Image (cartoon, rainbow, N blue to C red):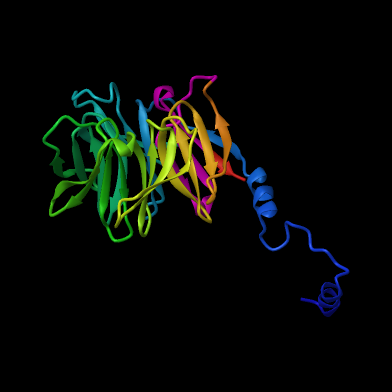
């Protein structure tokens, strides 16, 4: 700090404004500045795209296509490959699925939920290597992979969260307190969960399983991704995107509900400041620059 500034502070002649050095007012200033600018739409040749996932090793996007009803075992679903300019590289890159939704990558494997099973695919070739069946009526939805490789899966119709252990899907947590878990994101010591029944974003401690509500009023929380500095982007399937900071304060960044364009399971690429939004019934992926 310059000598003159130090002296003025010492004698009480200078008053530092509240936004100096990271105060709450500065945080509010940053919050107001965050916005989205659309940079492209893909063509509408996708088929009920539910989730987008970035694969940095190839600098491409995977897009899961339900191609019908999300609960029908019709073998119509597939995964597409798309570049970061919105060009569909391979429409039906991986097939043999019915209603693929959430995706996650661990090592050289791509994991995707498919109604009542978790499917493991070769991340390079797209071939199905293995399936993990859940022996009861379920509606598996999102997937997240922790830093140590543990795979978590939400069942948002039956109040359960599974994890892959000993080569089978085991129940990590269950019960009405989960409030219909959908979007998942794994952090070092907790899961970040979008609970659609309570329209809330919540933390679940991985050790104690204690639930803490972060923010509410979020609608059908379909996708949850980190936005940096303890904040998150959360999609409401109805067509809204929220930014939520570490204090749970939220800002609505996008609302396409009037146009009846959904916002399903989103992806964010921090290095490119690019937010990817699958539009579900609109059959596209939309890309937004975060500003």
Kindly give the residue lying farthest to the right in the view shown.
13
Which segment is the magenta one? 258-287
Q: How many marks?
A: 0
Residue at 43 percent across and 25 percent down: it is 44
Taking depth in this image into account, of 202 and 113 the one nearest to the observer is 202
Vertical arrangement, residue 4 with respect to residue 275, above or below: below
Expressed as whole percent of the image width and height from the top left, the position of residue 121 reads 21, 45
Expressed as whole percent of the image width and height from the top left, the position of residue 248 reads 52, 45
Q: Is residue 247 left or right of residue 64?
A: right
- The answer to whether residue 124 is visible is no
Residue 162 figure quarter: top left
Taking depth in this image into account, of 237 and 207 the one nearest to the observer is 207
**The C terminus, quarter of image:** top right
**The N terminus, quarter of image:** bottom right
Kindly give the residue lying farthest to the left in the view shown.
135
Q: Is residue 7 left or right of residue 284?
A: right
Taking depth in this image into account, of 114 and 22 the one nearest to the observer is 22
Vertical arrangement, residue 240 with respect to residue 162, above or below: above
Q: Is residue 278 magenta?
A: yes
- The answer to whether residue 56 is visible is yes
Residue at 55 percent across and 28 percent down: it is 255
Residue 126 figure quarter: top left
Expressed as whole percent of the image width and height from the top left, the position of residue 78 reads 27, 32
Q: Is residue 82 left or right of residue 243?
A: left
Kindly give the residue lying farthest to the bottom in the view shown.
3
Q: Is residue 126 magenta?
A: no
């Amino acid at each position: 700090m310059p000598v003159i500034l130090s002296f003025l502070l010492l004698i009480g002649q200078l008053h530092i404004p509240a936004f100096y050095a990271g105060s709450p007012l500065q945080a509010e200033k940053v919050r107001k500045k965050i916005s989205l600018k659309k940079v492209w739409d893909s063509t509408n040749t996708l088929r009920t795209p539910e989730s987008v996932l970035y694969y940095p090793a190839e600098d491409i996007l995977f897009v899961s296509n339900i191609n019908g009803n999300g609960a029908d075992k019709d073998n119509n679903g597939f995964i597409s490959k798309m570049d970061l300019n919105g060009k569909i590289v391979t429409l039906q890159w991986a097939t043999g699925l019915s209603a693929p939704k959430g995706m996650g990558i661990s090592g050289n494997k791509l994991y995707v939920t498919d109604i009542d099973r978790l499917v493991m695919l070769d991340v390079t070739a797209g071939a199905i290597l293995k399936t993990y069946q859940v022996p009861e009526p379920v509606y598996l939805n999102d997937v997240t992979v922790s830093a140590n490789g543990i795979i978590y899966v939400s069942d948002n119709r039956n109040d359960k969260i599974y994890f892959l252990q000993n080569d089978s899907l085991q129940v990590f947590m269950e019960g009405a307190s989960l409030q219909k878990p959908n979007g998942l994101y794994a952090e070092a010591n907790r899961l970040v969960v979008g609970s659609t029944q309570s329209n809330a974003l919540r933390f679940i401690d991985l050790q104690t399983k204690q639930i803490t509500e972060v923010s509410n009023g979020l609608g059908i929380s379909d996708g949850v991704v980190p936005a940096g500095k303890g904040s998150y982007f959360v999609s409401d399937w109805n067509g809204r995107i929220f930014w939520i900071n570490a204090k749970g304060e939220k800002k609505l960044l996008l609302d396409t509900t009037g146009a009846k364009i959904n916002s399903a399971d989103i992806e964010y690429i921090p290095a490119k400041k690019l937010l990817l939004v699958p539009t579900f019934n609109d059959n596209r992926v939309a890309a937004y620059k975060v500003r």
